[in-house]
Image (cartoon, grey):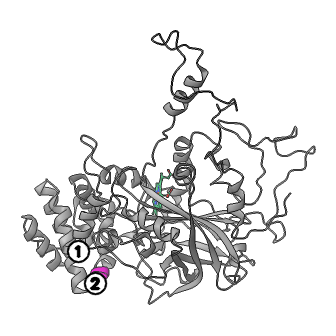
Amino acid sequence: TENFNVNEASKDKQLEQYRADDQGEKLTTNQGLRVSEDEHSLKAGVRGPTLMEDFHFREKMTHFDHERIPERVVHARGFAAHGHFELYESMAPFTKAKFLQEPGSKTPVFVRFSTVAGSRGSAETVRDVRGFATKFYTEEGNFDLVGNNIPVFFIQDAIKFPDLIHAVKPEPHNEMPQAASAHDTFWDFVANNQETAHMIMWHLSDRAIPRSFRMMEGFGVHTFRFVNEEGRAHFIKFHWKPVIGVHSLVWDEAQKISGNDPDFLRRDLWENIDKGNFPEYELGVQILPEEEEFKFDFDVLDPTKIWPEEIVPVKLIGKMTLNRNVDNVFAEIEQVAFHPGHVVPGIDFTNDPLLQGRLFSYTDTQLIRLGGPNFHELPINRPVCPFHNNQRDGYGRQTINVGQVSYHQNSLAGNTPSPANPEEGGYVHYEEKVEGRKVRARSESFNDFFSQAKLFYNSMSEAEKKHIIDAFSFELGKCKSKDVRQQVVEMFGNVDTEMATSVAKKIGVKPPSSTQVNVTMSSPALSQSNTKKSPET
Ligand code: HEM
């Protein structure tokens, strides 16, 4: 039973077994009993009370009453499609991941695109980050690349994520606004957590209003590791590059479309796949030898920094094609569970403190969102390779585990772990040497919040700069607190004085003071955290 081949159809074939075509079928209860009538409840007399024994009514109503599950705590609004990934050239010198060995090999994938802040029914063309999450169903298990369409993130440490999201999501007293960046708590968070500066520049740029999911880049954001057969590691960053290029809406269009067609992005994806105009993205990796970890003026573990592509080029290693729409949004798009911790041998983590915290958060949230510990058995989440372990029971268990043994170690069943050798393929974590004192602190090497934000702004064309200033004025202009507006203008004076001055004029606050030289010490909240020294540095 362990012999199987992964090809692009293998996930489709697996899903086939679960597909139920109700069209044209006779209605039955969940017990398979044919029902005679589906419009009237069973009553004592045609004008009398409904009877408790009406099992058909009870079953139908009970199921309906339980149809909703919690929406995702972030990225609630999303859409997805099936496809495959085809490798261009062997990555064997860098990683032993099997799906990255054979040029031409195809791996089935499922990709979910999303907005971050709005609820499940919110408009799709709002200004926001877009999620770009890919599940590769490989022969060694699922590898999830859970990325965004912006290459950096708002914060550096996962412990701030609940704060970030509480500030970004609609405000708790009136649940407004659905759009991420047009309110007081968003900007208050930004001004008091200035590591956000670089991400905010991207967020105010045209990148945050993509024309189509087919025209977006994707980024793994964190630094990951490739590990090859000899155990040698390289730092890497993942990129998706859309074959038809990156395109954005203009703000006026985005706003009108939000009203005319809140489903604009999913409709575009659905219709293009339906027509055979399949979206394609090339997978790129930036590869950095471990010896070069300290070669840069930023920390390669800092998720608020990019590795400039001029310095570390992006190597294109394969192409993903999305060629099949889902059959059922709930079963596939809502129930899919991505996790940056789903890796395969040859891919490993780094000590990026944002990534480290994400490794906890996803399973934790899915335990409640998908109702217990067996969501890996849902059709969309199942790996295409078999899975065996001593886990048992729990809500909604579907596997019928046979035999008497469900523990390790044993001599009765012989179900054992696998060594790491190529034949056996057991996952072994990269043996990174770590040492240090237990501290709650930010590494000093993470303290430059503005250089790359500046670099980003300076790389924009005049038209793009104008879009940023307009977006800034629109979004920050929605912040009611003048004090917060002023703090934000001060903060972004560190990125570009002219830009901040233009924004200040448009939103009725003073231009930034010209004395901001020591850019990382510009707010009391910051100077406190920045003076904490990490003993390691
Ligand atoms: C979804 C947590 C940072 C990309 C989620 C979900 C949680 C979460 C709880 C909901 C998952 C679910 O219900 O299935 C976090 C935490 C972060 C973090 C704690 C930082 C500490 C990031 C970053 C990225 C990212 C940096 C991009 C690189 C995504 C995407 C989804 C998601 C794309 C949607 C997945 C889907 O389509 O189902 N995140 N996240 N997140 N996150 Fe994060």
Few, some or many residues within 10 Å of mark 2 (<14, 14–19, 20+): some
In magenta segment, residue 470: no
Left/right placement of residue 493 relative to residue 424 reads left
Q: In the displayed image of the protein, which residue is found farthest to the right?
A: 412
Residue shown at 12%/71% (left/top)?
512
Residue 457, magenta (yes or no): yes
Where does label 2 land, which residue?
460
Which of the two residues, 338 or 420, is positioned nearer the viewer here? Answer: 338
- Residue 481 numbered mark, or none: none
In the rendered structure, the answer to whether residue 2 lies left or right of residue 306 reads right
Q: Secondary structure at mark 1?
A: helix
Residue closest to the eye, 264 or 235: 264
Q: Which residue is mark 1?
A: 468
Q: Looking at the picture, tell me which residue is in the foreground, 52 or 347.
A: 52
Q: Amino acid at mark 2?
A: Met
In the image, what residue occupies the spot 15% across and 61% down? 477
Regarding residue 477, the answer to whether it shows in the image is yes
| Marks 1 and 2 close (CB-CB < 8 Å) | yes
- 484 w.r.t. 275: above or below: above
Q: Residue at x 16, y 67 (%)?
A: 473
Name which of mark 1 and mark 2 comes first in the sequence.
2
Give the overall secondary structure of the magenta segment.
helix
**Which quadrant, please, contains the N terminus?**
bottom right
Left or right of residue 507, residue 382 in this image = right
Relative to 17, say whether 108 is above or below.
below
State which region is magenta.
Answer: 455-459
Residue 96 percent coordinates (x, y): 72, 75
Q: Residue furthest bottom?
A: 310
